[in-house]
């Protein structure tokens, strides 16, 4: 885990806005958050990525103060938050369904927090209008909330929180309710807003693409713990656990046993006898059950053996289907000997645009770009 | 099935109108026979004066009596003020109960609490009111308990006070306030409360800025229903207040039944109708709401 590293760099002069120290929370028999420690630097965009039920919402609600941890401590902006109520924390939250107040105008929504702090009417109006201007909605101050589009509501929800200049802005899957096109657009807008305001964002999502695009650091959460904490590039290119390799980005997962070794590269043979080569991660020895992962874009496709690099072991398969998705197009193969599915990204040159089902093709991949881990319990060969 | 669909699609506007008319007929009949007709009759009655046997003339004398006789408009005002007070107290009492049922209790507990509020209404209003009399009369349960506890030396009469009438009215009205309140509070998204809390609002600010504006139509609906029920209540003030109750419905009863003065009784009836209408309009104006919105909430 990278938590220790991050803690150290934080200690070397960077300001930490959020620090959790062995925080745990249990709900009726399930460990929602399990002894979690991490810190988030000022001004960074930090995402917590995990499948539903991994405990990320519980974690966010503990930071906001709606739930108290069973043990451990949370400090925000250097202050311990023990027994500090949500309305007294320097933290604001953008809710999943946004929770804009329908009984108030857009301007009143943004001014709500200022009014609670006792800011005078004139000042409130000035500041909320200035904030709406920054998110490009100053003309909508007098509109009702339900007159706005999904993306505009999103911006009001963020403006309503940011006008209070919180140390930390928490975002609870705010893009989940939007349609795909708008979601792509709001992703970019969120990133630009964060850069413009410089506020520390803590974002939770189950969508790995959101986490990768938006974040400076991502914590991949599973069963109440962080599987890995690092930059999006770390998670994608250097996954440390089979869960991360399988959850972040697309991956071909091949289970088998170690049957050979050449330096850091291991030979893995599946139960039905297909041998592949991959880098080993963690303690491995011959006969161990492993999970190997090969990214679809790591493999090269060819019709003739001479087109493949002869430094790499060659494999062959028959085309099962061509998955056209513009730049993300891929082909689904069946490995010839075993019939196992293998996905390969199609080159964007359009060279294999004429692939037909049942056609036999060759492929290879650099063992240095494939990785294998000791198999998890119940997930082995 | 197919035939039905074809027929309904092929229905002419005339047929559709006939269907609608037939469906509405019972309601229209009900309104016409039991509400409109008697009121027309009462209106005619209230606007005439008996000159001799079977000889009547148009007159405003019945209404004039109301204003010249202090007893009548004193009782009228007293009824209005006490009904308004009973409505307000019912609201204050029902709001926390509705909050617990709608927002705090979960699943079965919530239904159970609501059934507990409903159960007393399985018993007739008369029996319920007599129950209060058994509890409160001088030889009743509560005065005896007070003596036993040493609070009073002698058993005191707890019936026939204004406070007793209030207790009875609030008890009888509670459910009618609870139902619209619960439904309007249930529709309040908890995330809004959390968002307000997160943005720095305390309990009172959340109540004032989020909960009450959201529940306003429910609150108004409950208040209108309770106010009308209280204003027109006859049994509770009479039984719990005795001769001191001075409720306006009693005056109407007296005119019709005891004094056989139907003309005067009819005029009083119309004055009461005017009062409740006026109070509802004032209430809606004060809270800035529309009648249609409010009624949709009940």
Image: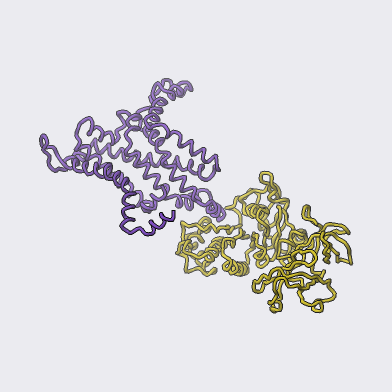
Residue at (70, 79) in percent of width and height: A349
The number of callouts visible is 0
Up the image or down, B16 lies above or below B266; here it is below
Q: Is residue B266 left or right of residue A31?
A: left
State the purple chain. Answer: B
Closer to the camera in the image, B1 or B122: B1
Residue A15 in view (yes/no): no
Question: How does the figure colour the protein chain or chains?
Answer: by chain
Residue B281 spot, x, y in % from top left: 32, 49
Residue A54 in view (yes/no): yes
The quarter holding residue B234 reads top left
Residue B124 spot, x, y in % from top left: 39, 32
The quarter holding residue A335 reads bottom right
Closer to the camera in the image, A153 or A109: A153
Residue at (38, 30) in percent of width and height: B129
Up the image or down, A325 lies above or below A158; here it is below
Closer to the camera in the image, B83 or B126: B126
Closer to the camera in the image, B152 or B186: B186
State the yellow chain. Answer: A
Residue A49 spot, x, y in % from top left: 68, 60
Up the image or down, A292 lies above or below A362; here it is above
Residue at (68, 71) in percent of width and height: A322
Q: Is residue B170 left or right of residue A36?
A: left
Residue B221 spot, x, y in % from top left: 39, 47
Q: Is residue B92 left or right of residue A235?
A: left
């Amino acid at each position: 885990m990278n938590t220790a590293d991050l803690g150290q760099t934080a200690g070397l002069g960077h300001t930490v806005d959020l620090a959790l120290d062995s925080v745990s929370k249990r709900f009726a028999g399930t460990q929602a958050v399990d002894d979690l420690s991490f810190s988030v630097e000022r001004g960074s965009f930090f995402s917590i990525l995990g499948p539903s039920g991994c405990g990320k919402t519980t974690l966010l609600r503990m930071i906001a103060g709606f739930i108290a941890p069973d043990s451990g401590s949370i400090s925000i902006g250097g202050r311990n938050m023990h027994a500090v109520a949500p309305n007294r924390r320097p933290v604001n939250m953008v809710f999943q369904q946004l929770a804009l107040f329908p009984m108030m105008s857009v301007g009143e929504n943004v001014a709500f927090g200022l009014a609670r702090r006792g800011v005078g009417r004139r000042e409130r109006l000035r500041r909320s209008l200035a904030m709406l201007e920054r998110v490009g909605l100053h003309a909508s101050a007098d509109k009702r909330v339900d007159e706005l589009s999904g993306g505009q509501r999103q911006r009001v929800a963020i403006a309503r929180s940011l006008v209070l200049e919180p140390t930390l802005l928490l975002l609870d899957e705010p893009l989940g309710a939007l349609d795909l096109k708008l979601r792509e657009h709001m992703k970019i807008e969120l990133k630009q807003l964060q850069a413009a305001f410089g506020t520390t964002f803590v974002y939770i999502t189950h969508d790995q693409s959101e986490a990768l695009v938006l974040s400076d650091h991502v914590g991949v959460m599973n069963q109440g713990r962080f599987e890995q904490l690092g930059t999006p590039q770390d998670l994608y290119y250097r996954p440390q656990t089979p869960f991360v390799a399988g959850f972040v980005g697309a991956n071909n997962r091949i289970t088998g046993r170690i049957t050979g070794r050449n330096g850091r590269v291991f030979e893995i043979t599946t139960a039905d006898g297909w041998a592949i080569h991959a880098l080993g991660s963690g303690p491995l020895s011959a006969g161990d059950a492993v999970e190997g992962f090969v990214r679809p874009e790591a493999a090269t496709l060819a019709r003739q053996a001479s087109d493949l690099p002869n430094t790499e072991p060659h494999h062959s398969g028959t085309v099962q289907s061509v998955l056209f998705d513009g730049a993300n197009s891929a082909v689904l193969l069946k490995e010839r000997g075993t019939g196992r599915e293998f996905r390969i990204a199609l080159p964007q040159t359009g060279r294999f645009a004429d692939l037909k089902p049942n056609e036999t093709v060759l492929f290879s991949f650099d063992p240095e770009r494939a990785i294998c881990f000791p198999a998890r319990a119940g997930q082995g060969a | 099935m197919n035939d039905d669909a074809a027929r309904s699609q092929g229905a002419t506007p005339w047929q559709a109108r006939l269907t609608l008319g037939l469906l509405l007929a019972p309601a229209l009949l009900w309104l016409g026979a039991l509400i409109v007709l008697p009121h027309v009759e009462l209106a005619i009655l209230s606007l005439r004066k008996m000159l001799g046997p079977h000889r009547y003339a148009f007159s405003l004398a019945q209404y004039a009596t109301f204003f010249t006789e202090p007893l009548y408009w004193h009782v009228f005002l007293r009824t209005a003020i006490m009904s308004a007070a009973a409505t307000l107290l019912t609201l204050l009492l029902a709001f926390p109960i509705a909050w617990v049922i709608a927002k705090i209790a979960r699943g079965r507990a919530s239904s159970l609490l609501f059934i507990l509020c409903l159960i007393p209404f399985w018993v007739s209003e008369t029996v319920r009111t007599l129950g209060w009399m058994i509890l409160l009369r001088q030889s009743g349960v509560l005065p005896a308990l007070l003596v036993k506890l040493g609070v009073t030396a002698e058993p005191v009469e707890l019936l026939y006070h204004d406070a007793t009438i209030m207790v009875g009215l609030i008890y009888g009205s509670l459910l009618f306030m609870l139902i619209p309140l619960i439904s309007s509070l249930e529709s309040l998204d908890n995330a809004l409360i959390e968002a307000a809390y997160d943005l720095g609002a305390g309990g009172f600010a959340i109540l004032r800025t989020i909960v009450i504006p959201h529940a306003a139509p429910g609150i108004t609906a409950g208040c209108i229903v309770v106010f009308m029920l209280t204003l027109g209540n006859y049994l509770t003030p009479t039984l719990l207040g005795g001769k001191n109750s001075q409720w306006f419905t009693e005056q109407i009863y007296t005119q019709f039944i005891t004094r056989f003065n139907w003309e005067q009784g009819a005029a009083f009836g119309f004055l009461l109708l005017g009062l409740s209408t006026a109070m509802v309009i004032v209430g809606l104006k004060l809270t800035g709401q529309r009648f249609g919105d409010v009624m949709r909430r009940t």
